[in-house]
Amino acid sequence: DGGITQSPKYLFRKEGQNVTLSCEQNLNHDAMYWYRQDPGQGLRLIYYSQIVNDFQKGDIAEGYSVSREKKESFPLTVTSAQKNPTAFYLCASSIKGEYAFFGQGTRLTVV
Amino acid sequence: GQNIDQPTEMTATEGAIVQINCTYQTSGFNGLFWYQQHAGEAPTFLSYNVLDGLEEKGRFSSFLSRSKGYSYLLLKELQMKDSASYLCAVSSGGSYIPTFGRGTSLIVHP
């Protein structure tokens, strides 16, 4: 079955540590996105990519980095520069202009 | 930029009908999406409106007026499992990137 998979489901990060969240899709979608969701908030766009080897900053890109070396994969690194990283991170993919499929999310907590 | 407004919270009774409104301001409008999100889970797609009018899909319907920058999601025959957050998202510009509102938390009680 086609879908989009995020891992891990839960992640704990120590202060000053970089962590990488995985996102893989087998839907053959060109576009992929990373959103952050805080309690009681909507989804805020971190980065997006519409083609392999190209990506663009979203509204809250500071402290994050991404890569798009393969069509299927769009990993997100939360760097130590992100001062408030505790949140629910959602990866999504779509055909351009159509609705997005979401992964099950990664809940990141700073300890 | 874009501005998307939805009510923060709504309550309704099982079996009733509820309408969740969404207003937006944007340039280069492409379309409007509605998603459902249960607590701690990923959003799931409900509907997509590109042209003005009503789109019906079972118990759920969505309406769009592009001239008014207005949409609503109508849920009929409410069930307890409909208790969730409902997210309005607007796609605009050449990139077609969806921008989300803060979501409306719907509580269905017996």
Image: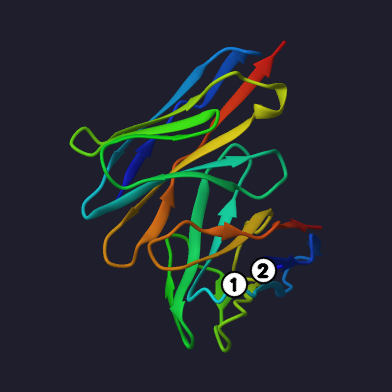
In front of the other: B35 or A40 = B35
Q: Position of residue A64 (x, y in %)?
A: 56, 71
Disc 1 packing (10 Å; few <14; some 14–19; many ≥20): some
Is B13 placed left or right of A30 in the picture? right
Q: Secondary structure at mark 1?
A: loop
Q: Position of residue B95 (x, y in %)?
A: 33, 67
Q: Amino acid at mark 1?
A: Leu
- Residue A49 versus residue B78 in the image, above or below: below
Q: Which residue is mark 1?
A: A27
Q: Which residue is mark 2?
A: A2
Is B91 placed left or right of B45 in the picture? left
Q: Residue at x 57, y 89 (%)?
A: A69
Q: Position of residue A46 (x, y in %)?
A: 50, 64
- Could you tell me which chain the residue with mark 1 belongs to? A
- Could you tell me which chain the residue with mark 2 belongs to? A
Q: Amino acid at mark 2?
A: Gly
Is A4 placed left or right of B27 in the picture? right
